[in-house]
Image (cartoon, rainbow, N blue to C red):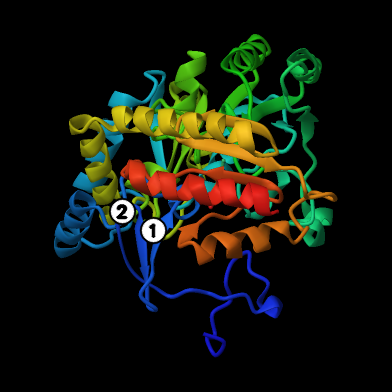
Amino acid sequence: MTDSPIWHPFTQHGLEEPIPLVTHGDGALLHTADGRAVIDAISSWWVTTHGHSHPRIVAAIADQAHKLDQVIFAGWTHEPAETLAEGLRQIMPESLTRVFFSDSGSTSVEVALKMALGFWHARGEARHRIVVMQHSYHGDTIGAMSVGARGVFNRPYEPLLFDVARVPFPAAGAEQASLDALEALCRAGDVAAFIVEPLVLGAGGMLIYGADTLQAMRQICAAHGVLFIADEVMTAWGRTGTLLACEQAEIAPDILCLSKGLTGGAIPLAVTMASEAVFQAHWSQDRARMFFHSSSYTANPIACAAANANLAIWREEPVLARVANLAAQQTAWIDTLAHSCPFENGRALGTIAALDLKSSGQGGYMNNLAPRLMAFFRERDVLLRPLGNTVYVMPPYCITPEQLDVVWNAIGEAVLAF
Ligand SMILES: *Cc1c(COP(=O)(O)O)cnc(C)c1O
């Protein structure tokens, strides 16, 4: 593949690591050109929920492609988008009455930030500050990077990233410090919004915190009129054991970002859902006050049809029961390994399970432990992509118990080998 002109994401081409060619997928498996069947234990970067090339989603895509492929969405509409918006309103928190479409998680975050700033602008209040959680990740565009953790990933761009205020991660035992920091910031009166990944910080290292803390954070924001943005791009669609992670804290955000599993992971689509108050702040008979945002493929009909198929699967199939079985098996594996393997911080929530290897020494994303681990798993036909010394599993919900055992046996071997 060395002659390929492709510039891959998050890939250092100078290291000449192998880039397998995938020919087809089914269920939790990815088949490669050299005849391997690899278990996709990270849902192809957290997107695939029901399995690869799921027949219902594929059929919906094919059917829609024959009817209408794409249409301008400014001032026009179509049936798949209307059905999807209505379907989302039925299953998402009642207070989120409006659905704005875009095409990736990063864009849904940009849209959320623009909605929040537009809300305060329309009210004539000078609130521009965004508060974020330490170690958070919200995407790779400039605005999304600005509200995420700073590090080697964004050093070249750092001078141009906008300033945000950060509250410490509410690690076990340190929750109150995090809440106090949020309270102090919100008190200042210049905060437009708090954006947070509910319950699990994904790219930050699968860091899990409590639903009580999330609920308290939501209450602090409400008390100070600060808009609460839930970035559920990774955590939604059953990942944490419930449809939304916010459900476990019994909260509803003012603005909600969804993408990844929205189409079952088959095709790009995102939505930013907003409360009526956020929508009404932009409602006017003055064109200068409309929400100025669009991307070319906003609410692409084929992508909306895939999302409608995903919603149908959620309505008609026991998705949460699959998630619960998967969760139980992963928790059992962490307990089993804990007796024989020297790792730290075994943790799990819903379909997500993670542990930290001790041997890493210097730690961090750039130590070469992760690529060596990836190669180790690749040799065993398991797709895992550790974050530094954190090995995590986040499989599609259709993974079989046998396939999941293969993944965890490989992890057990790795913990002993590294
Ligand atoms: C992946 C992710 C994003 C970015 O989504 P893209 O579709 O990759 O742009 C944003 N927020 C969270 C929490 C994510 O996990």
Observer-nearest residue: 207 or 133?
207
Mark 1 and mark 2 in contact? Answer it, CB < 8 Å.
yes
* Callout 2 crowding tier (Cα within 10 Å): few <14, some 14–19, many ≥20: many
Observer-nearest residue: 132 or 73?
132
For residue 360, which numbered disc appears in the image? Answer: none
| Residue 378 shown left or right of residue 22 in the figure | right
Observer-nearest residue: 326 or 212?
326
**As shown in the figure, which amino acid type bears the numbered disc 1?**
Tyr
- Residue hosting label 2: 303
Tell me: residue 177, above or below residue 384.
above
Q: Secondary structure at mark 1?
A: loop
Tell me: residue 391, above or below residue 385.
above
| Mark before the other along the chain sequence, 1 or 2 | 1
Residue 118, image x, y percentages: 59, 35
**Residue drawn at (58%, 55%) of the image:** 385
**As shown in the figure, which amino acid type bears the numbered disc 2?**
Ala
Q: Quadrant of residue 82?
A: top left
- Residue hosting label 1: 297
Mark 1 or 2: in front is 2
Whether residue 137 is visible here, answered yes or no, is yes
Q: Quadrant of residue 271?
A: top left
